[in-house]
Image: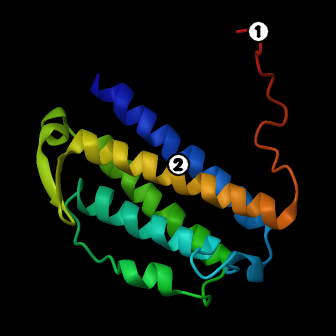
Amino acid sequence: MLDPLKNAAVYFLDWNLERIGRCLETLREEQIWARPNGHSNSIGNQVLHLEGNIRQWAVHGLGGANDVRQRDAEFAATGGVSKAELLARLSAVIAAAKSTVLALTEAQLREERKIQAYVHDGVFILLHVVEHLSYHTGQIVFWTKALQDRDLGFYAGVALDTTN
């Protein structure tokens, strides 16, 4: 059961990264840092937040690397990082997370760890990383579509079976 869980997590890490990458490539640099209002975050903030969260929860929490997260800075940023750099940073942390996940043993997935103020086992942490990434990917896709009024083509060329 361990391999299907780890393989599914790796699949969804890649799946979400591809969608975020497609959004970033379609947007202009200034659109990356646009905020719809004072209570919302830009796509750039979302990507910085995902980088920090994945590093803290997967690379540190599951893999034991140092916790270097500066969460407040993820949301305070108003620019200064290009879309290419955002994608490179997110890609690098996802690659590190995938390596960490694939190396986990069953005992490590059952082990409880403290991250932030929470104590959870490795399975919970792994599921949190994937669902958190998916949640914010949806926000990035929504904001990209709102900024551009276009279909991003995620399902272009895919024959969807609608008979079931």
Q: Position of residue 163 (x, y in %)?
A: 76, 9
Question: Left of 122 or right of it: where is 101?
Answer: right
Q: Which mark is residue 163?
A: 1
Question: What residue appears at the point 12 percent right and 47 percent down from the top-left corner?
Answer: 112
CA distance for labels 1 and 2: 27 Å
Q: Which mark is residue 134?
A: 2
Q: Which mark is residue 38?
A: none
Check the picture and name the quadrant holding the C terminus.
Answer: top right
Q: Position of residue 56 (x, y in %)?
A: 31, 65
Question: What residue appears at the point 35 percent right and 42 percent down from the top-left corner?
Answer: 127
Say if residue 4 shows up in the picture.
yes
Q: Position of residue 73 (x, y in %)?
A: 43, 85
The reply to whether discs 1 and 2 touch (Cβ–Cβ < 8 Å) is: no
Say if residue 26 shows up in the picture.
no
Occupied quadrant, residue 70: bottom left
* Amino acid type, mark 2: Ser
Q: Is the image coloured rainbow, by chain, by secondary structure, or in one colour?
A: rainbow
Q: Secondary structure at mark 2?
A: helix
Tally the marks.
Answer: 2
Label 1 vs 2, first from the N-terminus:
2
Q: Position of residue 50 (x, y in %)?
A: 47, 64
Task: Judge by depth and name the residue closer to the eye, 153 or 94.
Answer: 153
Occupied quadrant, residue 148: bottom right
Check the picture and name the quadrant holding the N terminus.
Answer: top left
Q: Secondary structure at mark 1?
A: loop
Question: Left of 63 or right of it: where is 102?
Answer: right
